[in-house]
Amino acid sequence: MVALSPSDMMQSGAALATRLSFLAAGFCMAAWAPLIPYAKAQLGASDAELGLLLLCLGIGSLIAMPVTGYISAQKGARGMVLLGGAGLVLLLPVLMLAGSGLALGGALFLFGAALGTIDVAMNVHGAEVERRSARPMMSGFHAMWSVGGIAGAGAMTLLLSLGLSPLMAALTGAGMAGAALLLAAPRLLRARAGDTPAAFALPRGVVLLIAGLTAIVFLVEGAILDWGALLNMERALLPKEQAGIGFLLFSVAMTAGRLVGDRLVARIGGFRTLLGGGLIVIAGLVLIVAAPGLTLPMAGYLLVGAGAANLVPVLFSAAGRQTVMPPALAIAAVTTTGYAGILLGPALIGFAAQATSLVLAFAGLAVLMLALPLCAGRIARI
């Protein structure tokens, strides 16, 4: 057995801390989803009112992301990972205590800010861990977000099914996520991320390209989440009760792809990952919107999940390696732009579907995805 050096042990611990941070963040985000109907019923809110309240979460995230990038660039990501994680753990039960629309809106804004904080900070931390290790690691980190999402939604659903009140279920889920963050805390890197940058620098140069490509990938992911079931119904592929199977297949394929993603990227490189992944996503979208029968469109969801699995990790890695901007600010810009794609994308899909059809709107996503293989060479040169 070869003894690990202190630096190797520290690096291994930092990688574990990054995985635990992604796991806890994905867990808390997904744990909120099964609680939404209870929060809606508690307030007696209409669908429109709930939509406005949920928008507070997105606004909080978008505001926190560039602030987190700036602070992480100055003082390192560790403090912001812990701040964002603590916010998620503390605020998840608070969401179940809100007795008015104003209170829930404020809690969701803070919950979104905590989510945006840990999202940027853990990606900054992960990029630094990957840089020090000199091997691909970002896909594995993002895989833990997916695993955390499955675990969070599953655990909360199980707790509620066992008869726990929404508040007790939220407290239990918060305790689970908090335990993961406590394990991560002493292992997070304490080093500064870099020199003090200018505040809130706008993305420029290749960072702007990375941000745009990330937004496209997130737009596709958001479209599958929000519109996939409706597309299956519009094409008469599945009945209403089973229309969500496409997103389930997509999620399973993406999680599996990310679990093996680091080895894949190490073997074939970033260029082939972006080129092949982009083409696979396009092929999957074509099957979803045009293939006859049921088997081929469902296979399309698997292809989209598998193809998209490692696109964002590779793009985040590139943002951490480029030299046009401080890495922390670059990752904040990429994260913010990508999150904006998730928030605004479904609305854009809706407008496009209203003007044409949902099938043509999804076909437009395939056209947008051409940017990934076309720009793969430029990203790979970073």
Image (cartoon, rainbow, N blue to C red):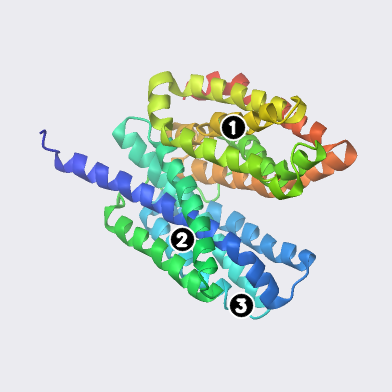
**Gap in Å between the C-alphas at discs 3 and 1?**
39 Å
Q: Is residue 314 above or below residue 40?
A: above
Residue 317 percent across, percent down from the top left:
45, 34
Q: Which residue lies at the image location 88% right of the left edge and 36% below the top edge?
A: 356
Q: Residue furthest right?
A: 355
Q: Say which mark, if any, is on residue 366.
A: none
At label 2, which amino acid type do we have? Gly
Q: Look at mark 2 in the image and give the residue it sits on.
A: 84
Q: Residue at x 34, y 30 (%)?
A: 135
Q: Residues within 10 Å of mark 3 (few under 14, many from 20)?
A: some
Q: Earlier in the sequence, mark 2 or mark 3?
A: 2
Rendered location of residue 382, percent (x, y): 46, 25
Q: Residues within 10 Å of mark 1 (few under 14, many from 20)?
A: many
Q: Residue at x 55, y 52 (%)?
A: 66
Q: Nearer the viewer, mark 1 or mark 2?
A: 1
Residue at mark 2 to residue at mark 3: CA–CA distance: 20 Å
Query: Is the residue under label 1 in contact with that under label 3 (CB below 8 Å)?
Result: no
Camera-side mark, 2 or 3: 3
What is the secondary structure assignment of the residue under circle 3?
loop
How packed mark 2 is, by other alpha carbons closer than 10 Å (few <14, some 14-19, many 20 or more), is many
Q: Nearer the viewer, mark 3 or mark 1?
A: 1
Q: Which residue is mark 1?
A: 302
Say which of 90 and 30 sits in front: 30
Distance (Cα) linking label 1 and label 2: 32 Å
The answer to whether residue 370 shows anywhere in this view is no
Upstream in sequence: badge 3 or badge 1: 3
Q: Amino acid at mark 3?
A: Ala
Q: Residue at x 66, y 25 (%)?
A: 282
- Residue 98 numbered tag: 3
Is 203 on the left-hand or right-hand side of 140?
right
Q: Which element is circle 1 on?
A: helix
